[in-house]
Image (cartoon, grey):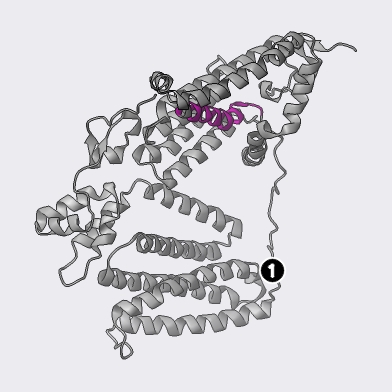
């Protein structure tokens, strides 16, 4: 039958041992290196599963997320030798973890995952491979790696190899002899426990089987999620274009159509700008039956959409700048007018907030409007300096990323509650919305009650919890929670751990 075993492992299993992958180096791995790499990976996986149990089982996520990400990075990059190449990737991971240390929310978790992925790729990528292309190939490989344990072909291949191994004959005979009696005994025992109160009471002293099953599934899930991240071998980078065409795509446009569009678009925006200036700055009268709040609400978001379309058109018109002497000044005028249009949209939104108060959507819209205005200002500079569209897109992406990162450190709930509760009495406050902002708005509630004591009863009636949030366990700690609340009595421990 030929040689079936290699180093005590069935040869077919050795060929299909996707869970025993080594470091993926360029040179040929020796048997001792392979065993050592497998031992490190399995040991690291066991450590991470136990650490996840300590950090997350029956605990609300907090600083535990950052600690677990650091542990994954340490296990995935540890090879027994310190290396200076890990310093910068580790700093990148710390930078990505800071928003989670501040406060756990969808935005901060996104930065943590992105930081972990980028730091792992940076730590393992070879100097001759492009960093971005390798990272994209690594991300593309992850779904297949996570799904590999669920692939029946792989496990069927392994089981067929085990069946062909002589050492497993005794194990198969033992299982065949005991599987039916043990399985049947467990079924009958389950039925008898339900009918026998003495047995039931005795077994109640044992850990709950369902909870143990849940915990086992939790361990298995953590292992499945983590083990692809521990593989230091990186796939071959995908091919990316090194340069972009100088002219850029034209999207079916021509010099004449772009020139005529710029003339018409500038005229339309000029009419809108003059009318907004007359109403918002000059005090011109609104149409009969319309107040400033309705005027602001009807115009803020359409004007933002107009500015976004203006930016897209500016990118499309960029290849035609040198084809007619009037296109460049008309494009600059178009961009400047749209910056002014963003300012008008922000003024309208400010009027609407003054009338109806702050909400998450209105805060996000204000930030987005500011970003669009800055992007359009960058587009003006791009045209003046004759930069390509790639220059604008890269800086716009960095600007947006930096804005989101800074936002992760702002307690938006507290700002909204402060803005709404400090409003003049003439404005109707949506107390139900204010009370739905959650525990991170407690400081704003306390300040409002201290300034106007009668608000305490109003807030309580609308469901506001005026007690500070407490941190019951160290795993749940975060800077924002510590600032707003603090440590309190530990919650009752679950009956089973």
Taking depth in this image into account, of 441 and 459 the one nearest to the observer is: 459
Please report the residue visible at 16 percent of the width from the left and 72 percent of the height from the top.
426
Q: Which residues are the magenta region?
A: 211-233
Q: Kindly report the secondary structure that dominates the magenta region of the rendered protein.
A: helix
Please report the residue visible at 44 percent of the width from the left and 23 percent of the height from the top.
196
Residue 358 is left or right of residue 218, and the answer is left
Label 1 element class: loop
Q: Crowding near pointer 1: few (<14 within 10 Å), some, many (20+)?
A: some
Taking depth in this image into account, of 96 and 484 the one nearest to the observer is: 484
User: Outermost residue toward the right?
Assistant: 1
Q: Is residue 388 visible?
A: no
Please report the residue visible at 76 percent of the width from the left and 27 percent of the height from the top.
156
In the rendered image, the quadrant that contains the C terminus is top left
Q: Is residue 287 above or below residue 88?
A: below
Residue 254 is left or right of residue 3, and the answer is left
Q: Position of residue 389 (x, y in %)?
A: 60, 60
> Is residue 310 inside the magenta stretch?
no
Q: Is residue 456 above or below residue 92?
A: below
In the rendered image, the quadrant that contains the N terminus is top right
Q: Quadrant of residue 68?
A: top left
Q: Is residue 40 visible?
A: yes
> Is residue 224 inside the magenta stretch?
yes
Please report the residue visible at 59 percent of the width from the left and 26 percent of the height from the top.
230
Q: Position of residue 417 (x, y in %)?
A: 25, 57
User: Outermost residue toward the bottom?
Assistant: 288
Q: Is residue 412 above or below residue 87?
A: below
Q: Is residue 42 above or below residue 271?
A: above
Q: Which residue is mark 1?
A: 250
Q: Position of residue 485 (x, y in %)?
A: 23, 40
Q: Position of residue 11 (x, y in %)?
A: 80, 16
Q: Quadrant of residue 225?
A: top right
């Amino acid at each position: 039958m030929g040689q079936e075993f290699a180093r005590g492992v069935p040869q077919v299993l050795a060929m299909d041992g996707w869970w025993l992958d080594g470091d993926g180096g360029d040179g040929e791995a020796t048997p001792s290196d392979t065993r050592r790499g497998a031992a490190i990976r399995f040991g690291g996986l066991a450590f991470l599963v136990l650490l996840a149990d300590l950090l997350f089982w029956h605990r609300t996520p907090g600083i535990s997320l950052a600690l677990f990400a650091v542990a994954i990075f340490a296990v995935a990059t540890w090879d027994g030798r310190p290396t200076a190449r890990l310093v910068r990737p580790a700093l990148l991971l710390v930078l990505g973890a800071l928003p989670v240390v501040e406060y756990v929310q969808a935005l901060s978790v996104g930065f943590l995952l992105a930081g972990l992925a980028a730091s792992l790729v940076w730590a393992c990528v070879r100097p001759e491979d492009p960093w971005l292309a390798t990272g994209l190939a690594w991300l593309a490989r992850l779904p297949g790696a996570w799904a590999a344990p669920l692939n029946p072909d792989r496990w069927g291949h392994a089981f067929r190899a085990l069946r062909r191994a002589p050492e497993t004959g005794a194990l198969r005979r033992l299982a065949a002899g005991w599987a039916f009696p043990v399985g049947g005994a467990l079924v009958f025992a389950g039925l008898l426990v339900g009918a026998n109160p003495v047995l039931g009471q005795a077994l109640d002293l044992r850990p709950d089987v369902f909870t143990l099953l849940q915990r086992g599934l939790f361990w298995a899930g953590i292992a499945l999620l983590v083990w692809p991240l521990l593989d230091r071998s990186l796939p071959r980078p995908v091919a990316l274009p090194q340069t972009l065409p100088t002219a850029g795509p034209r999207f079916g446009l021509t010099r004449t159509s772009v020139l005529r569009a710029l003339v018409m678009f500038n005229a339309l925006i000029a009419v809108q700008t003059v009318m907004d200036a007359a109403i918002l700055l000059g005090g011109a009268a609104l149409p009969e039956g319309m107040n400033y709040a309705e005027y602001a609400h009807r115009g803020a978001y359409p004007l933002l959409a107009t500015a976004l379309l203006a930016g897209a058109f500016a990118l499309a018109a960029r290849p035609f700048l040198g084809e007619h002497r009037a296109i460049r000044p008309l494009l600059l005028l178009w961009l400047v007018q749209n910056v002014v249009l963003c300012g008008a949209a922000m003024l309208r939104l400010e009027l609407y907030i003054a009338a109806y108060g702050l909400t998450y959507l209105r805060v996000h819209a204000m930030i987005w409007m500011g970003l669009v205005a800055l992007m359009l200002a960058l587009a003006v500079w791009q045209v003046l300096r004759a930069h390509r569209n790639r220059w604008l897109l890269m800086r716009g992406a960095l600007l947006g990323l930096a804005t989101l990162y800074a936002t992760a450190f702002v307690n938006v709930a507290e700002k909204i509650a402060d803005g709404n509760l400090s409003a003049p009495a003439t404005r109707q406050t949506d107390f139900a919305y204010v009370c739905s902002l959650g525990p991170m708005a407690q400081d704003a509630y306390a300040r409002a009650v201290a300034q106007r004591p009668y608000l305490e009863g109003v807030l309580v009636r609308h469901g506001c919890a005026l007690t500070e949030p407490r941190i019951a366990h160290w795993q749940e700690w975060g800077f924002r929670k510590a600032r707003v609340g603090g440590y309190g009595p530990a919650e009752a421990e679950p009956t089973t751990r």
